[in-house]
Image (cartoon, grey):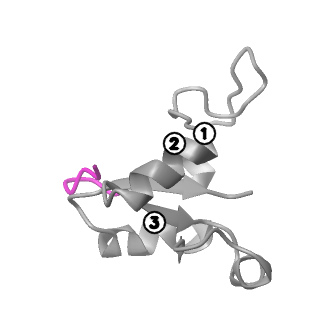
Amino acid sequence: AVNQDRAPASASTIPDEHGADGLPYPEVARITPAEAKARVDSGQAILVDVRSQGEYDTQHAQGARLLSLADLEARYRELPQNAEIITYCT
């Protein structure tokens, strides 16, 4: 859930940290594509593609909503407050 009292950190203020496995932002929970699909199919979550419009137009996950990372800070309030938000960028 998004904290309405404060805007999310901008990309320029988020530190570029990596965990022991080499993945960036180790504090961010990760799930498998199968888990994401199950959550979206059940209505529990929505899928948000944070890539550019061109990347989205080339190929995207079925049912994904485009909200590019560049626009996320300004538009995050458009996302439902009562659903899990699953983002992807590859």
Q: Circle 2 is placed at which residue position?
A: 35
Task: From the viewer's side, name the closer residue of 25 and 83.
Answer: 83
Which residue sits at x=59%, y=54%? 11
For the C terminus, which image quadrant?
A: bottom right
Which residue sits at x=49%, y=62%? 47
Query: SS at mark 2?
Result: helix
Q: Circle 1 is placed at which residue position?
A: 32
Which residue sits at x=51%, y=65%? 48
Q: Is residue 33 magenta?
A: no
Q: Are marks 1 and 2 in contact (CB under 8 Å)?
A: yes
Q: Which stretch is magenta?
A: 1-7
Task: Tell me if I can see residue 26 in this picture.
Answer: yes
- Say left or right for 62 vs 9: right
Q: Circle 3 is placed at which residue position?
A: 73
Nearer the observer: mark 1 or 3; the answer is 1
As measured in the structure, the alpha-carbon distance from the residue carrying label 1 to the one carrying label 3 is 25 Å
Q: Reading the chain from its start, which is encountered first: label 1 or label 3?
A: 1
As measured in the structure, the alpha-carbon distance from the residue carrying label 1 to the one carrying label 2 is 5 Å
Q: Is residue 4 magenta?
A: yes
Query: SS at mark 1?
Result: loop
